[in-house]
Amino acid sequence: MSQPEAISPFVLPTWVDSALFTGMLRGIERESLRMQSNGFLSQADHPKTLGSALTHPHITTDYSEALMEFITPPKESIPQALNYLADIHAVVHRYLENGEKLWPLSMPCMLDDQEENIRLAQYGTSNIGKFKTLYRHGLGIRYGRRMQTISGVHYNISFPDTVFSALQQHETDAALKALNLQDYRSHRYLGLIRNFIRLTPLVTFLIGASPSVCKCFMTGREHQLLPLVKGTLYLPYATALRMGQFGYQNSAQKQLGIHYNNLTAYVEELQKAVHTPYEQFSHLGLNDEQGEPIQINDHVLQIENEYYSLVRPKQVPLAGETPSQALAERGIGYVELRAVDVNPYSAIGINEDSAGFLEVLALYCLLKESPDLFDAEQEIIDKNQAEIVNRGRAPNAKIIEAEQEYLLEDWVQLHINAMQPLAELLNQTYATDLYTQALLVMQSRIDDVAETLSAQVIEDTLEQGGTWSFGSLMANLHLERYQQHVLSPETLAYFEALTQSSLQDQQQLEQDTSISFNDYLANFR
């Protein structure tokens, strides 16, 4: 088993030049629940005036009918990506009905006792639409619907091929030098992914923002959370409960043994999980008493997207391709950083500081040495992550790396120091001070734990008298931001055209009745 010997000092190679990074791209996916004016989860349909959730490229739904997802295209700078995300929010705000608002926290707004009142996302009567809803039904019976109301931010990032060509030229390993560009790029992206997994506690501490939950979220579950204020539970030093045992967890997946050491093996392991029955899910059955399907299959994963991970290797799939087939064919095209809480203080769920920090971190993970990651080291990482999720703001929070124990703030400081030259490099690339500014904000959180987002959320939840009151206050403040955000006539026309074309695309899919859904599902099974 190879493990990092110690936190090796990171030295920026002298040949690395800021011009190399021109052409970096980033895209953002932000999830947010629609909340009724009384604070409860919306029971209404996804607004038709926003188009089809099945076929709209930027405004869709995730697990539940009320869980909206906003997706930007890849953009050439952070301000462009954030502005596009703000455009989407402003458009959505125009069409929300009956006083509904966007809930601003990762952990959900008020849920009632009935799980069935968390409505599954509906995508119409086409086979693909029914398939997507069935997948969500399967998630519900496997893990409960409450878990599926959690929101997050996914930050997608890609580096230009000039970076990979330059890195490959400076390799000393003949085998790596001999790889074609596609395979070498995948090799380096996997290194980034392994390092990001090792450094996730950094993200959890610095931008985690879910230290407390509405009591309703824990209905029917055993937990060790404490009362913070009426109707709100928390842990005194928690940072991001969304990233811990009450967030996206799947015991079946723990046994998968999916590793990020080589792309061929990763793809094989993922595909194996989609084809391997799992006893617990077999007991649930495939169909109900009426013969209606209740899950896609009884395998460890119904489909590949069910694999919950902190970070994903991605490639844009062509029509009919699964994510892993796209990776096998064309290698890794970008990475999706998924360990990001919604920032309740930002009207769009993420701000420049978090985005800048994530990009510097991604570059650090790409350039830093990244030994293979095996189960023994993964167990230590899991313990580190649990420590930071539950106790990250405690004065004695600790991290274990390379068989050494560090005080959390010392460990975070070591890595933030090492990232400084990379922030300066990206500043030069974009002629900005955004990246060093982002690290200054992170430094203030290391210097004073009260400056962290999670500490602020606790303070404001107490001050407002509970999760709902705090969330409601922020939702109303964000409303003003959406109203003030100027949409150009071109942007409005573009989104109006998308509404119409997405509805037409859905209709077209629904007109294809050449195969029944039962046959469609049987073919997949």
Image (cartoon, rainbow, N blue to C red):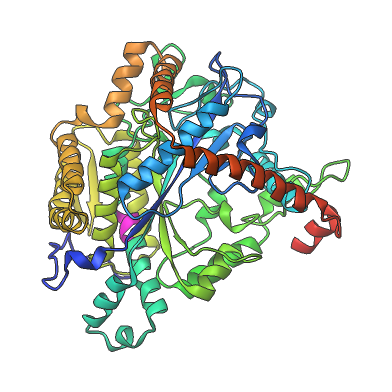
Question: Residue 332, located in which quarter of the rendered image?
Answer: bottom left
Magenta span: 194-198
Residue 309 in sight = yes
What residue is at 70 percent from the left and 39 percent from the top?
122
Q: Position of residue 140 (x, y in %)?
A: 65, 39
Q: Is residue 152 left or right of residue 133?
A: left
Q: Residue furthest front?
A: 489
Q: Nearer the viewer, residue 317 or 119?
A: 317
What residue is at 57 percent from the left and 28 percent from the top?
95
Q: Position of residue 271 (x, y in %)?
A: 59, 66
Tell whether position 465 is magenta: no
Residue 295 in sight = no
Report the quarter where the C terminus lies: bottom right
Q: Position of residue 454 (x, y in %)?
A: 30, 30
What residue is at 67 percent from the left and 36 percent from the top?
120
Q: Is residue 377 left or right of residue 46?
A: left
Decide: is 208 above or below 355.
above
Would you say the magenta stretch is mainly helix, strand or loop?
helix
Decide: is 317 above or below 264.
above
Decide: is 176 above or below 311.
below
What residue is at 40 percent from the left and 21 percent from the top?
480
Tell whether position 195 is magenta: yes
